[in-house]
Amino acid sequence: MASKYDGLARIIIQNVGGKSNVISLTHCITRLRFKLKDESRANTEVLKNTSGIVTVMQSGGQYQVVIGNHVPDVYAVVCEIGGFGGDQQDSESAGSGKPQKLSAMLLDTLSGVFQPILSVLMATGLIKGILAILTFTGLLTPADGTYQLLFAVGDGFFYYLPVILGYTSARKFGLNPFTGIALGCALIYPKVTALTSNEVMEVLFAGSIFESNVYATFLKIPVIMPKAGYPSSVVPIVLSVYVASKIENMWKKVVPDVVKNFMVPTLTLLIAVPVTFVAVGPIANTLAALIGFATQAAYDTSPVLEGLIVGAFWQVLVIFGLHWGLIPIYIMNLSTQGYDSFMQPYFAASFAQTAAVIAVLMKTKDKNLKGLCIPAAISGLFGVTEPAIYGITLPKKKPFVISCIGAAIGGAIIGLGNVKKYSSGALGIFGFVTFINPENNDTSSIPWVAAGVLVASAIAFVLCFMLYHEEAREEVKAVEPAPSNPGVKKITLASPLKGTIVPLDQVEDAAFSSGVLGQGVAILPEEGVLYAPADGEITALFPTGHAIGMMSANGAEVLIHVGMDTVQLEGKGFTVLTAVGDHVKKGQELLRFDLDVIREAGYSAVTPVLVSNSAVFTDVIATDDGQVGVGDTLLTIL
């Protein structure tokens, strides 16, 4: 059955470089997260300008297409049309991508392991929060059958987290998923967990943060386990599955095909399970202890300062996908302490972002912007802020900075209140219930959370309402008719460079010489400074700085591409002096570039200057001069 997202899905697949360029695909709350073999094959600008796509981000080794709240539906259609198996990678494609930096690999791994479960993890946490409200109000008691059955849903998912992460980790690392599940089952098997009730055989590192109890031996090797066992644990199963994936790959190479189907998992588990209990588990526990000690030390040093920093920078981390580095710490704190305080100042950020959007909504007279603000504000109230960030506050700059200021102060208040979150419940307004302690119905964190949210929202709204002003757009000015033809109006564009004129049909890149990107002319520059050819607004700017687009005040869309294939320089030699959304004046410096860097890398410095919407005009006429200086008439548009 056809879906309304079929067209969008086909555009996405085509412009990420086609099916053959996709290594893996996952999604989070608002984004499709591709891992591509070659990101340079993706048409980022086409995707950014496609209806139904908010923006495109490239971070952490992932090519992220931001869709919005309906991303699960788009994801399903993309997978169906593209024949993708989600985040599962085959051995051929997994090894075909470019080598990643360690930080990018870590973020990619964390997001791949935790993304698939976050929505259900939030749902089960929300159920526990609702139960806390029901018992607090006396509508239910923990002895009621209704409470016990619903609590089994809310708490059971978290208890069996090693099993669930065994599956997601296996898909991420290329292990047989059911082998990953078997590892998780072994970690929380009741008789294994019961070992911690035995008499302690030996205590290692007594009195330190690494204190460990030995409860049993395996072939006379000590088995070290945490006091509570491995239920609800995070780090041990992820590391164990990674080790098991390497063991499985080894056996796949040597076991005969006739018995591979059952012997590979058998041999893998026979080695991986003991290694998990005698080596990987203790290493993971040590790592968890270090992380827990470090985060708690940071929090204890100054909860207010820690809250201010987390609140201020949370949305920045979200933009680049770096928040995935903190989520495992949060889940680990829940499993070991029963609550988390370290990350909770983030809670004010989504409300500050939403308040800034509401202020823009109330001040703007732009109908299109109002249309963006309403759904973004609704989405933000439920904790999903990407539509607000990418659609409104970040492009406008000032509202985004103001929202971060509000979130910082709100986060400081939450830090001051030593707020504790007891379950991984929903975001936004539904998140308040997760600050109720289900053990004793303690609601002492709620007033501090509410105060942080209200202050953050009030500051963001008031400052944005006072300081946000829409820049007046210059009206399209009527140009004096040409004497020879009173019905013709002329628009002129000044030369943005000093140099030698090169006719467009002599440019070596067919995309420019064919005129498919617009009519115009090229310049071989003598100096490495690019100036604005007219008054107008910057509408596009490649991160590498090699290409820039603007809408002139008189309606001409101008595209300037510095050099041929200079995207390969990845920004080396380019200094950008403007940003998307900036209003610039004719003759204003837009960017600087090093001609020597371009030439030494073997690239041509020929720079096309195009009118990309030339189809709406009668003609685009280039100057007859062979040389031009900055500010000379370059193009005349009729």
Image (cartoon, rainbow, N blue to C red):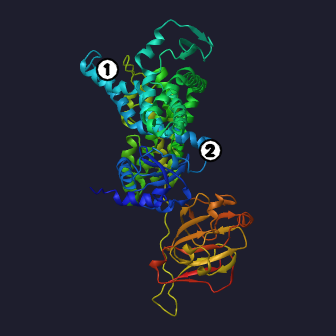
From the viewer's perspective, is residue 478 above or below residue 560? below
Amino acid type of the residue that numbered disc 1 sits on in the rendered structure: Phe
- Residue 136, numbered circle: 1
**In this orientation, does residue 630 appear?**
no
Using the rendered view, name the quadrant where residue 629 is placed: bottom right
Say which residue appears at 47% left-offset and 12% top-offset: 195
Residue 459: percent from the left, percent from the top? Answer: 48, 40
- Position of the N terminus by quadrant: bottom left
Closest to the observer, 317 or 414: 317
Tell me the SS state at disc 2: loop
Q: Tell me which numbered mark, 2 or 1, is placed earlier along the sequence.
A: 2
* Residue lying at the far bottom of the rendered structure: 484
* Label 2 sits on residue: 101
Crowding near pointer 1: few (<14 within 10 Å), some, many (20+)?
A: some
Q: Position of residue 403 (x, y in %)?
A: 50, 44
- Gap in angstroms between the C-alphas marked 2 and 1: 49 Å
Vertical side of 421 occupied by 371: above or below: below
